[in-house]
Amino acid sequence: MPAAGASVWQRLAAWGHRNLPTRESMESSWLLRPVAHRVLDPGLWRFTRRSVPRGVALGVIAGFLFPVAQIAVAALFALPFRANVPVAALTTFITNPFTTPFLWYVAYRIGAWLLRSEAATIAQPVTEAATGWLHWLTSTFHWLWAQGPAFGLGLLTLTALCALAGYAASALGWRLWIARKWRHRHAKSGD
């Protein structure tokens, strides 16, 4: 349990450490049992400058595009790309019940902009709710069906942009972290 005076970053690091999947938990997963020998390869569990950014990008892709079994999908994606499995699995938490509606709305807006769609706003079916819930439900379904291409294109675009941004940010963060370690090492040797 983190101390009461711990910083936000220390609490986040402690939460991540508690929730990172272990090799044993991945081995016992029924979904990963057929490829457990590959998932347990030690190279996939090391934190290196190449495997961590790959894990972040693949975790974002799995989190955005797969609504269920995201951790297992991220672990499977990590195999051919030699990405870090724990980072890929933890990054899938970017989508959760709090962030998903916002991300889906942004994806729809991006898709509508790319398709130059002038469709009705998201609130139009709600205004028809006064005539009955069944009519509201059917009109909402028809509205969602009509917006599918915009949402799909927007989701793919948003996924690609966020995966690239996550890759770049984690690669830059890794370099800054290593540079900081080197500065501290040289400062200690200079004392």
Image (cartoon, rainbow, N blue to C red):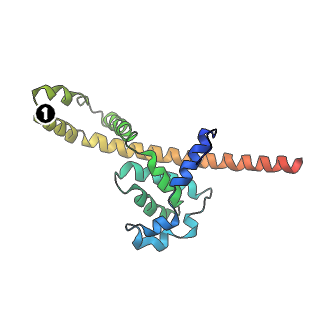
Quarter occupied by residue 6: top right
Tell me what residue is drawn at x 62 percent, y 46 percent.
Answer: 173
Q: Position of residue 35 (x, y in %)?
A: 43, 71
Q: Position of residue 108 (x, y in %)?
A: 32, 37
What amino acid type should be assigned to the residue bearing mark 1? Trp
Q: Does the rendering let one see residue 112?
A: yes
Q: Does the rendering let one see residue 55?
A: no
In the displayed image of the protein, which residue is found farthest to the right? Answer: 191
Is disc 1 placed on a helix, strand or loop? Answer: helix
- Residue 54 is left or right of residue 132, and the answer is right
Quarter occupied by residue 114: top left
Q: Position of residue 99 (x, y in %)?
A: 40, 39
Total labels drawn: 1
Tell me what residue is drawn at x 41 percent, y 66 percent.
Answer: 29
Q: Position of residue 180 (x, y in %)?
A: 73, 46
Circle 1 residues within 10 Å: few <14, some 14–19, many ≥20 = few
- Residue 59 is left or right of residue 1, and the answer is left
Q: Is residue 29 above or below residue 162?
A: below
Q: Which residue is mark 1?
A: 133
Q: Identify which residue, 32 or 157, lies in the foreground.
A: 32
Q: Is residue 127 above or below residue 161?
A: above
Q: Is residue 80 above or below residue 96?
A: below
Tell me what residue is drawn at x 52 percent, y 58 percent.
Answer: 86
